[in-house]
Image: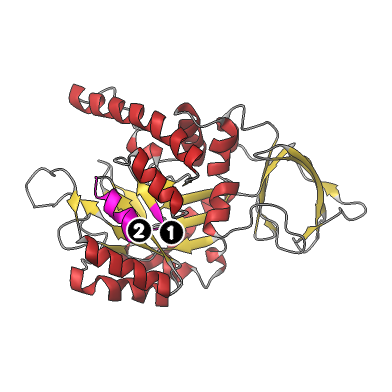
Amino acid sequence: MTAWRVRAAALPGGDAVDAGISGAGSWTSRPAPGAELLPGRFVLPGLVDAHCHLSVGQTGDGQPVALDAAAARANAARARSAGVTAIRDTGSPGSVTLGLLPTPDGAGLLACGRFLAPPGQYYPGLYAPVPAADLVGAALAEVAAGARWVKLIADFPVLRPGEAAPDPAPTYPLADVRRLVQAVHAAGARVAAHATTRQVTGLIDAGIDSVEHGTALTEADLSALAARGGAWTPTLCATIGADLTRSDPDRRKRRHELRERLSSLLPDAARRGVTIMTGTDVVGTIPREVALLAGLGLPPQAALAAASTAARRFLGFAAGIQHGEPADLVSYDNDPRDDPAVLAHPAAVFAGGIRIA
């Protein structure tokens, strides 16, 4: 098998690196004699999608729909070919993605398993409702099945057939959320919470580990989240990235106001020490997510770290060269700090020691 020399600027910082990848796909401190130069002048330790749903798709009118295991595997393979070598799947219908973990498709994958939501407060067809009395038991069952994270739907509209969706409302009492967090932590796993309302303050106090979406966060919430060593996955492609040119004026106004809030909150979160992570949800891409982060005030290096080193460290993946370990990397001919669109065009990709692009 081919041995490679990796001679490039290591991003997001840009330090020069000159290392090797053995014919078996492991990092070496020095390139082997005669090693072939890996394409690309800039290298990252693999991109991160910290909030995606490999087994959820969309219908023609944009409604979410459950996908089978074969589709989930295909989505994971496409992500890896694009340089995303660390994936946190934040909820799958029927815990489909947990079934990928014991297979080669599970390399670099963290799967939350099922969505934890009560009756009438999540998308029909994507989940089996979990009453409050069963919340802890349902979460621990996912952990026992291999989940290192569980996904709590902490607020959502109360959906009634034939009625327009109202504003989101809390799904479970905070006392139940606190018991959930304590039990999951005791079992060695962590909690990611879908949160779009002011309920997020109580969720952080209850000890959740990452806020997903977080459109109602405040500066005080960010301080509390930072103090707990928590993370925020803003999923900007899903929350503000849609084209609203044909939408009604009120919706455009709300989206503009959210952009203004986020342009203040995201840099503030970074200053306070909150780990910011990129996540595509069902509609986005990592290059677009990085571009939105940079457009909302994060320095290019910090925006890139949210898609690589910072997110990898938080999720427990290697964030750099670890000699003797399987290589995870993505390289580029041009510098994505200058233009995030470069991230869509990798020169080479290694995932788990195997070159896949």
**Residue 219, above or below 27:** above
Callout 2: SS: loop
The residue tagged with tag 1: helix, strand or loop? helix
Residue lying at the far left of the rendered structure: 162
Coloring applied to the structure: secondary structure
Residue 284 in sight here:
yes
Which of the 4 image quadrants contains residue 266? top left
Q: Are marks 1 and 2 in contact (CB under 8 Å)?
A: yes
**Amino acid at pointer 2:** Leu
Residue 16, position in %: x, y?
78, 40
Against 145, residue 268 (above or below) is above
- Describe residue 185's horizontal placement relative to residue 156 as left or right: right
Tell me where residue 246 sits by quadrant: top left
Residue at image coords 23%, 52%: 155
Give the residue drawn at x 52%, y 37%: 287
Q: Is residue 160 left or right of residue 6?
A: left
- The amino acid sitting under disc 1 is Ala
- Of 94 and 256, the residue lying toward us: 256
What's the residue at 81%, 56% (across, down)? 2
Q: In the image, which disc is placed on residue 125? A: none
Q: Is residue 155 above or below residue 307?
A: below
> Is residue 202 one of those drawn in magenta?
yes
Question: Is 270 within the magenta?
Answer: no
Segment tinted magenta in the rendering: 198-210
Q: Position of residue 1 (x, y in %)?
A: 80, 61
Q: Which mark is residue 67?
A: 2
The residue positioned 44% from the left and 51% from the top of the image is 227
Q: Position of residue 263 (x, y in %)?
A: 40, 29
In space, the residues marked 1 and 2 are separated at their CA atoms by: 7 Å
Q: Residue 222 placed where, x, y %?
A: 39, 44
Along the line of sight, the residue nearer the viewer: 347 or 135? 135
